[in-house]
Image (spheres, rainbow, N blue to C red):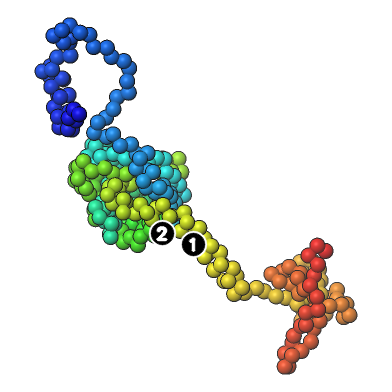
Amino acid sequence: MEAILSKKEIADLLKAIKQGQVSLDLDKNGRKHFTKDCIPLNLFQANTFSDELSRLANFDIILDNFCQNLAITLTNNLQRTFSISRSQIDSSHFLDFLLENKDVGAIAVLDISPLKHGALLLVDSHMCFSMVEIILGASTEIELIQPNRKLTSIELNIIQSIMLKGCDDLDRAFAPLINLKTSLIKVESNSRMVSITDADAEILIGTFEVRVGDQTGEMKIVFPLSTIDPLREGLKDLLNVNKAKQGIWTKVLEQEAYNIYSELIAQSGTISMSVGDVLEMKKGDTLFLDYNLNSPLKVLVENKHKFFAIPGTHNGKKAINITGVKDQGA
């Protein structure tokens, strides 16, 4: 069996071909080499994300929970309606990702103990400037400013306060799997100043679309594959866990419903009066109710007629005795 070339040997061979050190002409016997169309293969990234997604089933549920929680947090804190939706999940190598995102607006470095390596939260410059303007009190009637430059240190500090609140949202998203204690280490605008894993380590990237009013932007969250891999078994059972919790909550809600207080009114009669007549009422006036002494009282539950009753007393206090249930079809 012929030996298989290593990655380094393949790289050296390709380099030699580009430099012309290896000829691609006819061999010494004059034989022609026939070629056919083929699909190019990246030898350094042969594993596709579809393979990783199958290994990390239901990871998209975690990301969806995170973006929903964060949208609520931003809406409550900035008093503007934010919507965040997941657009895709990708994989890449850490260094390649940083090079592709060197012009991003803000990068938050997160510690996600007890998981190792940490995570990154990236917000593009367009959305960063929009949030800064909103925090500083920009009117909803004016168009938000979008400078063509990097964020200043002051603007990064403003963004940091928002990203800090997102730590709790990440903890809640992972709560069905693990008790995270996410903390914000720092916020940078230069991708070369952040590092959470080796340059050639594979990472998982969740990309989200952020909307506030007419403004749209992009946000990304990054996890090293080795960080999420220990949660693989928990992710497989995530749907079962959610169903079990839903069943528990249903029982809790049913039990708590019996402890809710309702307003009951024993109504002996009613009267209709104009606003003018009410304003003219004075002490000593007599109002005649439309009520038959031989008829039972109407018992209203939250202003809806539910029972019939007769008045009386019990231990010296006024009381009613339920005599029947109102036909709901009547």
- Taking the spot 10% from the left edge, 18% from the top edge, the residue there is 21
Label 2 with label 1: CB-CB less than 8 Å:
yes
Q: Which x, y percent locates residue 105?
A: 29, 42
Total numbered labels: 2
As helix, strand or loop, the secondary structure at mark 1 comes to helix
The numbered disc on residue 176 is: 2
What amino acid type is highlighted by mark number 2? Pro
- Taking the spot 21% from the left edge, 48% from the top edge, the residue there is 197
Earlier in the chain: of badge 2 and badge 1, it is: 2
Q: Which residue is mark 1?
A: 245
Category of crowding for the residue at label 1, using alpha-carbon neighbours closer than 10 angstroms: few (below 14), some (14–19), many (at least 20): few
Tell me the quarter of the picture where residue 231 sits: bottom left
Marks 2/1: CA–CA distance: 9 Å
Depicted 25 relative to depicted 328: above or below? above
Depicted 330 relative to depicted 281: above or below? above
- Residue 242 visible here: yes
Q: Which x, y percent locates residue 168?
A: 36, 59
Tell me the quarter of the picture where residue 102 sits: top left
